[in-house]
Image: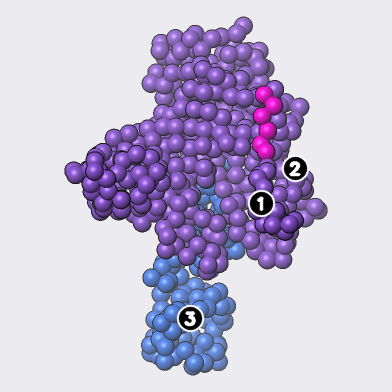
Chain colours: A purple, B blue
Amino acid sequence: MAKTIEEINEKIRQGKAVVVTAEEMIGIVKEKGVEKAAKEVDVVTTGTFGVMCSSGIYFNIGHTKPRIKLGGGKVYLNGVPAYAAYSAADLFLGATALPDDDPRNKYYPGEFPYGGGHVIEELIAGKDIRITAQAYGTDCYPKKSLDAYINIHNLNEAMLFNVRNAYQNYNVAVNSSDKAIYTYLGMLKPRFGNANYSSAGQLSPLLNDPYYKTIGIGTRIFLGGGMGYVIWHGTQHDPGAERTERGIPKVGAGTLAVIGDLKQMNPEWIRGVSVKGYGASLAVGIGIPIPILNEEMAFYTSVSDEEIYAPIVDYATAYPNREPDIITYVTYKELRSGEIEVLGKKIPTNSLSSYPKAKKIAETLKSWIQEGSFLMTSPSVPLPGPESGIKFKPFSGREILEEVEKK
Amino acid sequence: MTTERIVLRFPKELADKPIVVNLVRKFDLDFNILKATITPDEEGVMVLELSGEEESFAKGIAYLKELGVKIQPLSQDVIWLEEKCVHCGYCVNFCPAKALNRDPESFLVSFDSQKCTACGICVEICPYSAMEMKIFV
């Protein structure tokens, strides 16, 4: 018998809802079967914690006296450039922003010790952040420069706003070349010396709702230690990607755009990161509760690491040249064992996302729902599924150099 | 028989002296160089695994100290900042000494400073700056 979100919420309010993590659901369905599990379980909580580059914050600093119009000027936060092309007092800071004087990869591999992600972590931690700004001055906004400390407690709105998070599955990176390479999936030793992966697998939100039957615009989520929302499908959303028989994408597929109040967040779940040779970024913790509306959702949420395949991609050749080649597929169970076999060779594996943190997120969300402080939401619009025809298209702009060469 | 992993710091003026080889010749000690480097201010830093009879070992250490070589035990040199660690486990398979481990059940990371050879790879690659090297500070 199917349940509704309202029925589940009523149970949550009465403290009677049965909430389990996606890890616990595997055993429950194995033991009791899909039908019984669907009846007994109301909500399955998921979690993921990893480096998610397409993240950033926007916030409003209030108006100085006399007023300054930051829009069109230049603004730095602890030396990291922020986007200042809104109006007077709104700013955006991206996770991968770097100070102008960071040597990048000039001394290869670069260290990227401090960037946008680190500023975001420090802001959330309640530390003072130094803002330096130059503006051009107008009759209504006469002030032309600003050098001050700001603090999250004194800001107006401050939101984490991530345009692509919680990737539904991801590549496993290897390196076929003769030298070490430094990628966003970490350092890859030469000649297939290691394989790096980054997914919470069986705990990952979109792998537990592979066709986005319950997750959509307006879904309330755990974001960085506070409550946030799914606000759109993420950039590069690719629901039409190849799937296994049980609907699990075999490559990176769906993504989420999310938003949440920075003031509710905690640096335990939002961390600045430095990826050697690649850049600075932000690690984000996300958890999504999945309502078990019917047997279908009980089945989807029972997915285990041995049923989720990830593609092995060569980051020395195929990836940088955007070739579609996939060497082979391995399961997350194999990846998590610490060693996989690729092309007849045993390769040690390294995870960039934290399984223990993903688990703690799912458990935290579970306790929030059990306490009645977190209610389930019906999305106002579902995320586009395979039937939408949405595809992640490659770049198709006309490169100028090419046109000149043709002439 | 005593075996210890130690960090030796050679002042500039000792950089060209055959000190380590004397440990073998004069004191019959075995050594294994785990790491050797020259800092920007020309101080030599060497991480050694040194072993031998207890008495000769003590004499060897006394000889080094007499020459002005600074000695400290190795375990103090790489520090795991547990509060910064997110237990992703990225470092584990990079560690050549197996000082970093991951529990196969909980996937929690642990650090055994006794096994650490202070090669520094974990310090270089940890995205969360959870490993710190104390040699160069």
Quarter where residue A168 is shown: top right
- Have a look at marks 3 and 2 and say if they share a chain: no
The percent coordinates of residue A325 (x first, y second) are 77, 47
Query: Which mark, residue A311?
Result: none
Q: Is residue B119 magenta?
A: no
Quarter where residue B59 is shown: bottom left
Is residue B7 shown above or below A8?
A: below
How far is disc 1 from disc 2 in space, using C-alphas?
34 Å
- As rendered, which of A280 and B42 lies closer to the eye? A280
Is residue A166 shown above or below A291?
A: below
Q: Tag 1, which chain?
A: A
How far is disc 3 from disc 2 in space, using C-alphas?
45 Å
User: Residue beneath label 1, please?
Assistant: A399
The percent coordinates of residue A330 (x first, y second) are 73, 42
What residue is at 74 percent from the left and 33 percent from the top? Answer: A242
Q: Amino acid at mark 1?
A: Glu
User: Residue beneath label 3, please?
Assistant: B38
- Classify mark 2: helix, strand or loop: strand
Q: Tag 3, which chain?
A: B
What residue is at 45 percent from the left and 52 percent from the top? Answer: A97
Q: Which numbered mark, 1 or 2, is in the foreground of this view?
A: 1
Say left or right for B97 vs A174.
left
- Regarding residue A333, the answer to whether it shows in the image is no
Secondary structure mostly seen in magenta is loop
Q: Tag 2, which chain?
A: A
User: Residue beneath label 2, please?
Assistant: A329
How many residues crowd mark 1 within 10 Å: few (<14), some (14–19), many (20+)? few
